[in-house]
Image (cartoon, rainbow, N blue to C red):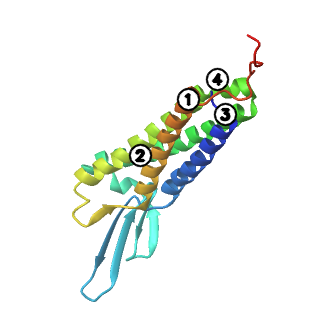
C-alpha cells in the first residue's frame, strides 16, 4: 500500500515535469536553425507552438498564420496546430492530476491506499498526450520539406520529452509502491497471542 512519503516524492517529480511542460509551450524553441553568413553574422530561426522567431527581424510573430496554411501547407498547419492542442490539453490534465494528488494525500489512509489507481492513470494519460505531441513534431521535422539539413529539434522538444518520461516513470513508481511497500500504520500482532 502506498504511503504519504511515496505520494509526496511523486508529487515533487510531477510538479517538476509540469514546469517542463509549461516551459515547452511558452518557450518558442521546438525546432531551430542556426547559420553564419560570410560576413560572420549569425542567423537564428526558431519555431514554437504559437510563435516563430527570427534573428533577421529581431521579433517573434504568431505562428501558424492563415497565410502559412494554404495549398500544400495545410497539412503542416493542421499537424502543428494539433500539437498545440495536445500540449494545452496535457496542461489541463496535469491540473486535474494535481487536484487528484491533493485529494489522495489529504484524504486519509483509505484514500491513499486506493487512490494510487486514479493518480497513476492520470499521470499516464498526461504522459501519453505529451508523447503524442512530441511524436508529431518529430514526424514533421523528419518529413516536411521546410526542415532541410541544418534544422534541429531544440529545447522545447527536449523539455517535452523529459516531462512525459518523468510522468510515465512516476506512474510506474506509484503503481509499484502500491504492491511493494508495506501499509502505513496498520495493526500489529501482540507477541505470543495468536
Q: Are marks 1 and 4 in contact (CB under 8 Å)?
A: no
**99 is higher (above) or lower (below) than 108:** below
Question: Considering only order in the chain, which callout, 4 or 3, is on the residue closer to the N terminus?
Answer: 3
Which of label 2 and label 3 is nearer to you?
A: 3
**36 is higher (above) or lower (below) than 84:** below
Question: Considering only order in the chain, which callout, 3 or 2, is on the residue closer to the N terminus?
Answer: 3
**Where is residue 171 shown, x and y percent of the image?**
52, 36
Q: CA distance from mark 4 to mark 2?
A: 34 Å
Disc number for residue 180: 1
Q: CA distance from mark 2 to mark 3?
A: 36 Å
**Where is residue 74 shown, x and y percent of the image?**
30, 47
Question: Considering only order in the chain, which callout, 3 or 1, is on the residue closer to the N terminus?
Answer: 3
Which of label 1 and label 3 is nearer to you?
A: 1
Local packing at callout 1 (Cα closer than 10 Å; few below 14, some 14-19, many 20+) is few
Q: Residue at x 33, y 85 (%)?
A: 41
Q: Are marks 2 and 3 in contact (CB under 8 Å)?
A: no
Disc number for residue 83: 2
Asked whether 88 or 114 is in front, the reply is 114
SS at mark 4 in the image = helix
SS at mark 1 in the image = helix
**42 is higher (above) or lower (below) than 114:** below
SS at mark 2 in the image = helix
Q: Which residue is mark 3?
A: 3
Q: Residue at x 39, y 47 (%)?
A: 134
Question: Considering only order in the chain, which callout, 2 or 4, is on the residue closer to the N terminus?
Answer: 2
Question: Considering only order in the chain, which callout, 1 or 2, is on the residue closer to the N terminus?
Answer: 2
Disc number for residue 114: 4
Question: Considering only order in the chain, which callout, 4 or 1, is on the residue closer to the N terminus?
Answer: 4
Amino acid at each position: 500500500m502506498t504511503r504519504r512519503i511515496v505520494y509526496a516524492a511523486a508529487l515533487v517529480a510531477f510538479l517538476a515535469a509540469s514546469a517542463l511542460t509549461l516551459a515547452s509551450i511558452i518557450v518558442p524553441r521546438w525546432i531551430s536553425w542556426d547559420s553564419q553568413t560570410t560576413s560572420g553574422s549569425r542567423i537564428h530561426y526558431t519555431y514554437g507552438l504559437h510563435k516563430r522567431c527570427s534573428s533577421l527581424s529581431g521579433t517573434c510573430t504568431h505562428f501558424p498564420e492563415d497565410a502559412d496554411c494554404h495549398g500544400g501547407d495545410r497539412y503542416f498547419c493542421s499537424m502543428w496546430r494539433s500539437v498545440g492542442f495536445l500540449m494545452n490539453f496535457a496542461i489541463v490534465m496535469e491540473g486535474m492530476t494535481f487536484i487528484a494528488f491533493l485529494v489522495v494525500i489529504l484524504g486519509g489512509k483509505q484514500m491513499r491506499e486506493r487512490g494510487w489507481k486514479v493518480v497513476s492513470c492520470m499521470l499516464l494519460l498526461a504522459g501519453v498526450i505529451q508523447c503524442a505531441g512530441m511524436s508529431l513534431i518529430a514526424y514533421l521535422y523528419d518529413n516536411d520539406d521546410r526542415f532541410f539539413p541544418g534544422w534541429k529539434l531544440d529545447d522545447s522538444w527536449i523539455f517535452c520529452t523529459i516531462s512525459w518520461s518523468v510522468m510515465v516513470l512516476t506512474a510506474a513508481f506509484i503503481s509499484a509502491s502500491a504492491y511493494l511497500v508495506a501499509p502505513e500504520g496498520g495493526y500489529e500482532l501482540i507477541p505470543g497471542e495468536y
